[in-house]
Structures are given as structure tokens and as C-alpha cells.
Amino acid sequence: MLTQQDLKQIAQRGISEEQIETQLKQFETGFPFLKLEAAAAVGRGIIAPSEAERSQYVDAWQKYKAEGRRVVKFVPASGAASRMFKNMFAFVDADYDVPTTDFEKKYFQEIEKFAFYDALDDVCRKNEGKGIKALMSEGNYKAVAANMLRPEGLNYGQLPKGMLLFHKYDEGARTPMEEHLVEGALYAASNGEAHVHFTVSHEHIDFFKQKVAEKADGFAQKFGIKYDITFSEQKPSTDTVAANPDNTPFREADGRLLFRPGGHGALIENLNEIEADVIFIKNIDNVVPDRLKPETVEWKQVIAGVLVTLQSKAFEYLRQLDEGASDEQLREMAAFVEKCLCIDPKANKVDADYLRRKLNRPMRVCGVVKNVGEPGGGPFLTYNQDGTVSLQILESSQIDTNNSEYMKMFTQGTHFNPVDLVCAVKDYKGRPFDLPAFVDKTTGFISSKSKGGKELKALELPGLWNGAMSDWSTVFVEVPLGTFNPVKTVNDLLREQHQ
């Protein structure tokens, strides 16, 4: 099935023939649905700390940072913002000229509220000889939208989301990239330095670096810190081959195999190369203006405090296991693993080997918010490959929709995870874990796409916070809804939280 040209193309990407064969097999077999025990809830897998406990966790985090630990803020920022503007692309291409849908009407009625209004007004004057108000008054709404989207204007249809102007300030509008630099200074800085890492797509990395270089010094002076800002791209070796509907390799017009990015699960490789004791992970578009940051900063410190408190206990137990733990100590460890890490052994023998396996692995604490219908992964108690049950973040595609009991769990779940993670990635001897070793390779996603008018199947790797972290110790903490303010469409920027 694979030609010599295919093998050469595969090798250039750093992918093995076996990986391609496995991926093509996965198109045939699909991925097994996960076996669920229950949706996580407060009191069953989700911690809801009291005010006094929150204060203790913040103190624990501050103490941990004061010990000279290396903390990194990891921001997946690869995607272009094109999906944000789907409605406005449709308007530009529509066979009518005035705002007609509710979305279009809202956009133009409230256009002055957007942080990019002044910049858009400038490019309209340059390209059309008139500002936004004049263009709208003469009914030329499409010129305004086109100048926002297209390369000769702001080019927002192609830029990465991290480079768009999101929030207004007296000193000038800020992008999400800038808001993440501010957050890094407020809760992730240690030893007077904030380490921030952005994953960026290849075509945008130079522009991203240029913008960071322009802005970082100003924030460094404002917060009295230094920034260490690094970048990485999704590796070509994590791309996946596309398939035809009959599961044979999809080929371009010139006969070459078509490869597609493997989804955010590919970033486990990037995460694995970060030198850090603790890593915060948060999506590029989940940011708020300064006036709303105190709540976010407090809760980031709370979940980090939960993490380092649990990690400290796990390290203590691992050292006891090294020395030869007593039966009483083993019972205490078993209670910790079951109650604090929420791992149910089921039929597994709870002995020193089992406890070491469950204690000596990466750990993450995930903020979860009350379910209000926003898209996101849900927190569940899920069966693992070894027969144990533990906490996982699941997407709807991992759940058997024909199982009415599971669908009830999914639809009636009280919480969801908005990608709000803090991760401990070193073992009790200070050595970094090999994170790809903890991926559940039996998880993943297959979706339908098209290329050049031809249907194809696309394969996504186990998601970064789903299957890629399946064999980590996971703990969920309920955080306020105010800490979650994603921007999925341009009109989300008109929400009160982004004004």
C-alpha cells in the first residue's frame, strides 16, 4: 500500500512506517468508547475548598515558590482565529449587503465596543478613504467586515487568536498574548522571573516573537520581574496521515500522502521538553481584563496549592516505600490514594508495588466550573486499562451515545473542564517524568473533513488533557465561573467580561 515515495515522505517527517500502519488500522477499527462509573461531582471527585482552606492553599503555593522552584506557564496558541469569524466571512460572501442575522446586527450595532475598533477604523480610512461610521452610513457594511478579515486590512481572518486585540485600556488595547504575560507575572513568577511558553504554528511564529519582543519589556518594568519567554511548534512527527472513506491513504493530486496536524494531543511532546517543576496550562483565548484578574489569580494559586500539598504527601510516601514501609504506613498510603487522589483499586491488589505505581507518576489539578452549557470536557470517574477507576477529562466523542446510562451522566453532569490545569512533572527524586509514557494510545478522535472537494477522514491523537494525560494522578477543584471567559466568536468580545 505504501510506495517508496511514501516511505521517503514519512521518513522526512520523522514518522515510522509502523506508526502509519497503526494509524490506518485505527481508521478501520475506530477507538473504543470509555467505560464510565459516574460523572464527578462535589464530594465525589471534585473538591470545593472553603474560604479558610483556600487561604491555606494560597499560602502553600507562595511557600513552594519561595523555595526557588521553576514554574512555567504553558499556553497552546497554535490555531488561527478563522473560526472566530465564521459568521463575518459568511456576511462578506452573502448575497445581501446589510446586516441581516442577529449575529451581524449585534456586531455592527456594537462595533465601537471592540478593542480593535480604532485599528479597524484606521485601515478603513487607508483602504477605503473613509472611516467605519461613514462606510456604515452609506450602507457599505461589507467593506468594514472585509477590512477586518483580509490581509490588506487587519487580517484577523488569518492571524492567530493570540495576536488579536481583545481588551481596551487607557494606554492601548491588549492581545491575549499580552494578558497571558500579565497573568504569568501575577501567579507564576518565582525568583523574580516569569517563564512563559507559547506553542505557535510555523507560519505565525516569527510574527508572534516580534510582538512579544515589543511588549515584554513594558510588562517586566510594570511588575518588577524578568520574563523568560520561549516558543515551540507542533512537531511534524506528530502529524497524522489522512484516509479516504474506505480507509486507504488519502493522496494529494500529485500522489503524495496528505498529513494533518494531530490535534492538541500532539503538544504532550512540547510539554515534555519544558524544564519545570510545575506547569500551568491555559488556553490562549481564556483571558480577562485587569479589573477581573484578581479572582483568576487567587484561584490559580489555590489549585497550585492543592497540587503541591498533594505532591508533598505523595513524595513522603514514596520515600517510605524506598525504606520499607510498615503495614500501618501502607494502609495510610492506600487511604490517601483512594480518598485524596480518587483512585479506586477495584480488583487490584493494594500492595507496595500498586501504591508505588499510583504515587510515582505525573500529577495534575484541574479547575472545573459549573456546567452552563459551554463546550468543554467533562470530569468523570472512568475505568483505566489496569482495571482501576480514576478521574479523567472526557470529550463527548469518547462516550458511547447509544448507552443511555452514559448519556445521562454526560448530559446531567454538574461540571466541565475549561482547560485550567496545573501540573507537577518531576518525580520525588527531582527527575522529569517521560510524559509520552503516560499516554493512553487507545484513545483518540476520528473526524470527517474534505480537501479539494474530496471527503477524507482525519485522525487526532489522544487529547492533551484527555488521553495524553490518562495515566496521571488527577484531582478536580471547583473554581468560579468568572475564571472561565473563552472567546469562540468575535461577538463574545462584546460580553461584559471582555469590556
Image (tube, rainbow, N blue to C red):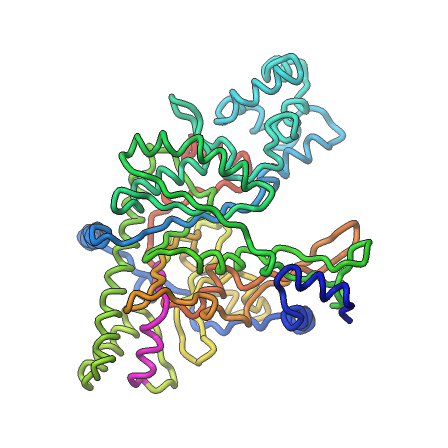
Determine the image quadrant of residue 156: top right
Image: 352 above or below 389: below
Instruction: In this rendered view, identify the residue nearer to me: 273 or 271.
Output: 273
In which quadrant of the rendered view does residue 342 lie? bottom left
State the quadrant of the C terminus.
top left
User: Residue 420, position in %: x, y?
Assistant: 40, 52
Query: Which residue: 33% across, 43% down?
Result: 194
Q: Residue at x 31, y 78 (%)?
A: 356
Q: Report the number of numbered marks.
A: 0
Give the residue displayed 49% in from the left and 38% down from the top: 209
Image-based side of 69 in relation to 251, left or right: left
Identify whether 89 is placed above or below 153: below
Q: Is residue 239 magenta?
A: no
| Residue 354 on the magenta segment | yes
Q: Which residues are magenta?
A: 350-365
- Residue under the point 38% across and 55% down: 421
Q: Relative to 22, is 324 on the left or the right?
A: left
| Residue 147 shown left or right of residue 471 in the figure | right
- Pick whichever, 371 or 332, lies toward us: 332
Residue nearest the observer in this picture, 193 or 251: 193
Residue 445 spot, x, y in % from top left: 60, 63
In the image, residue 110 lies at what x, y percent? Answer: 52, 25
| Quadrant of the drawing holding the N terminus | bottom right
Q: Horizontal and vertical percent for residue 132?
A: 59, 17
